[in-house]
């Protein structure tokens, strides 16, 4: 089968490499950066450039760009996909994208399923892509729910075949609520945490927890401001809850109230320990 | 030389094991838990029990208990240390401990230097101790500043010999300000972060950043409420700054203001990147 990939950054590049590693599929890729195209060909992550004439020969098309660019690209190519083609985007927000792309697929013979590969690194670009980025990762898929089950089964098998550990089906709304908490909020905290005058002096005074807290602050503001705003309500909700909890610590500390402080720390510990249970 | 260690938990146990691994010193230890004593002897982390008759024969005594217990133990044994003995505590706050222990050493022939081994794990107790816990870690020492330089040089050599990567000298106040930010604040954030109704559903929806954010929430409330309150002013200052920064993200999101949001994310990214520079 031929697989088309749009956007050969960290995610698209790693998808290409995983497909080449695990399957016999041919991969045709496209990236707006000529330098990235050259790298991807040189590293044999792709078999060639995804052209308008090759696009209708692809059985699966993966769109791994920023959210707005995902919608624009699928919209511009809605007439070119062959009947039966599975189109999956890889955007980090799902309601915003699915609401815009789903109508394009309606009444046409190709299938669209929203997707989000749950892996990443704090660096971006093809140079950081890896053929094992997804080996411990979930691929989240957010179907409408009224698809032909064979389409969903084929989608699931495709992502397991190319190296994902598992495939999780959920709704766009559920995805967005969870991702606001597990991923977007972590990026907010990391950026807020590192932005202290004390950060520059951390050497010799820090162990693992400082590194953990500040790792993902490296991400770029172009992509992440878009992702945050496309998921504004869910992220606001998680962020407000976190600020409330931090304020509980602050108030207990401010009052010098050991029992209250212990209760707050205990609540976090018990919650964390409950997550380790099978 | 004989080394005495009080408290054979994660830190005291790891110190004992590091000393046995790297030096020919004899280690005598004491822990209030008979089970821990048995484990430590069985694992050959110690050569025997640190008794009142052995204490005056130790050239170095390391006190690795909770802050209040550190002060109480040194106070109760202030008459028993031999002349020239180096006593170093391992408490995670330094002003509170040093202010109380320093006067005990004055007018006596033993030396006290406040210390803090900059390594840890999110688990506690001897069972989690390791002989390589400190191999990438700093040992922070907070002398008064008017000590005989030979005492400080000997302290430095001792900690390098037993396996620390480096020794950092600083003041108790500087230590407490830095540790409030690099370590205590991380523990506050981690506990606040994990305490969400969404946490229990994270599986399949999380990658590295959620794990990073919530790892140290496992720590116990007895020790950490004591550490937080003993360093209340410094921790409050770092926590208030973090809440202010999170509120900047929240307000930019709430306003749907992309440029403002980009500026906030960019500030964190640039700060983070500046820390990677040599």
Image (cartoon, coloured by chain):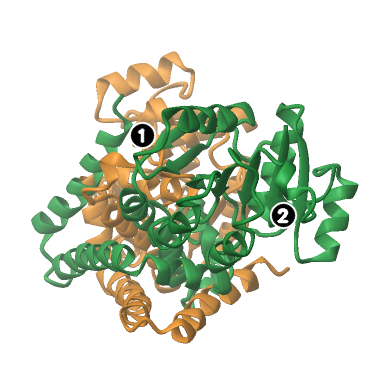
Chain colours: A green, B orange
Q: Secondary structure at mark 1?
A: loop
- The residue at 62%/64% (across/down) is A76
The picture quadrant where one finds residue A47 is top right
Report which residue position mark 2 lands on: A8
**Is A24 on the left or on the right of B40, as rendered?**
right
Whether residue A203 appears in this view of the structure is no
Q: Chain of mark 1?
A: B
From the top left corner, tell me how far across and down residue B165 is, in percent.
Answer: 64, 49
> Which residue is situated farthest in the front direction here?
A107
Q: Nearer the viewer, residue B130 or B77?
A: B130
- The residue at 66%/59% (across/down) is A124
Q: Is residue B133 above or below residue B104?
A: above
Q: Quadrant of the C terminus of chain B?
A: bottom right
Mark 1: few, some, or many residues within 10 Å (few <14, many ≥20)? many
Report which residue position mark 1 lands on: B9
From the top left corner, tell me how far across and down residue A72 is, in percent.
Answer: 58, 67
Q: Secondary structure at mark 2?
A: loop
Same subunit, tags 2 and 1: no
The picture quadrant where one finds residue A257 is bottom left
């Amino acid at each position: 089968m031929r697989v088309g990939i749009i956007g050969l950054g960290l995610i698209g590049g790693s998808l290409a490499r995983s497909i080449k590693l695990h399957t016999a599929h041919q991969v045709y890729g496209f990236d707006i950066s000529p330098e990235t195209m050259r790298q991807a060909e040189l590293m044999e992550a792709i078999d060639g450039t995804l052209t308008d004439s090759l696009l209708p020969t692809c059985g699966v098309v993966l769109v791994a760009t920023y959210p707005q660019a995902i919608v624009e690209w699928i919209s511009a190519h809605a007439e070119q996909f062959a009947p039966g083609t599975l189109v999956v985007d890889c955007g980090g927000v799902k309601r915003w994208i699915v609401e815009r792309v789903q109508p394009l697929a309606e009444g046409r013979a190709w299938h669209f399923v929203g997707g989000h590969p749950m892996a990443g690194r704090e660096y971006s670009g093809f140079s950081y892509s890896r053929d094992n980025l997804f080996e411990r990762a979930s691929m989240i898929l957010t179907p409408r729910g009224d698809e032909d089950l064979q389409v969903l089964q084929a989608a699931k098998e495709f992502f397991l075949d190319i190296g994902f550990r598992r495939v999780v089906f959920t709704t766009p709304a559920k995805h967005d609520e969870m991702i606001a908490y597990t991923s977007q909020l972590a990026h907010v905290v990391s950026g807020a945490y590192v932005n202290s005058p004390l950060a520059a002096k951390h050497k010799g005074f820090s162990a693992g927890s400082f590194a953990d807290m500040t790792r993902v602050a490296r991400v770029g503001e172009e992509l992440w401001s878009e992702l945050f705003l496309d998921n504004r309500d869910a992220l606001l909700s998680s962020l407000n809850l976190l600020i409330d909890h931090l304020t509980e610590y602050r108030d207990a500390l401010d009052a010098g109230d050991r029992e209250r402080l212990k209760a707050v720390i205990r609540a976090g510990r018990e919650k964390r320990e409950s997550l380790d249970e099978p």
